Amino acid sequence: MSLGDSSTELGKVRGLGSAREGGEHWISERVSSLALLLLGVWLIASLLFLPSLDYGTLREWLRSPLGAVPMALFVITSFYHGLDGLKVVVDDYVHEPGNNFALNTLLLFVAVFGAAFALFALAKIAFGAAA
């Protein structure tokens, strides 16, 4: 009798998906969703409490640490969560390994470039270089 035959059915699958790593990915999706929910509520509430939504007011708000730091977290979490979700779609629907790898790599580059661009623009505003 092998070791696999002697364990219970629950013991064979506890904490493992079909690819033996599903549980960790599921938790990662839920945590980033929760973070986006909280940061989204913060963003909407912050915008509602501003006296106006003109460029000058938003610039001053983003120059403060209470505006810039959560906004940077929102940008990072948004791109991470979006990349995570799109990778699941590619993994589910693109079955050829070469195409799967190419699309996942392209998605990674687009997400990193987009996040870097957004963070650069935020830093430029936060540190006063934007006119």
Image: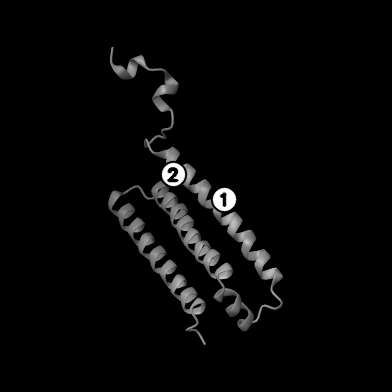
The answer to whether 60 appears left or right of 82 in the picture is right
The quadrant of the rendering that contains the N terminus is top left
Near-viewer residue (53 or 13): 53
Q: Which residue reaches farthest bottom?
A: 131
Q: Quadrant of residue 36?
A: bottom right
> For mark 1, does the 10 Å Cα neighbourhood hold few (<14), some (14 to 19), or many (20 or more) residues?
few
Q: Position of residue 26 (x, y in %)?
A: 48, 42
Mark 2: amino acid = His
Say above or below: 83 vs 114: above
Please state which of residues 112 and 76 is positioned toward the viewer in this rendering.
76
**Numbered marks: total:** 2
Give the foreground label among 2 and 1.
Answer: 1
Q: Residue furthest front?
A: 65
Q: Is residue 128 above or below residue 116?
A: below
Characterize the local packing of mark 2: few (<14), some (14-19) or many (20 or more) Cα atoms within 10 angstroms. few
Please give the name of the residue rendered at 70% of the width and 78% of the height, measured from the top-left corner.
Answer: 52
Q: Which image quarter: residue 119?
A: bottom left
Label 1 element class: helix
Using the image, tell me which numbered label, if any, was put on residue 34: 1
Under circle 2, the secondary element is helix
Q: Which residue is labeled 2 in the image?
A: 25
**Amino acid type, mark 1:** Leu
- Label 2 and label 1: CA atoms lie apart by 14 Å
Residue at position x 45%, y 55% from top?
A: 86
Percent position of residue 80, x then y: 45, 57
Query: Which mark is first along the chain, 1 or 2?
Result: 2
Residue appearing at x 43%, y 72% in the figure: 117
Residue displayed at 44% across by 67% down? 115
Q: Which is more toward the observer, 70 or 96? A: 70
**What percent of the width, then of the height, locates residue 78?**
50, 60
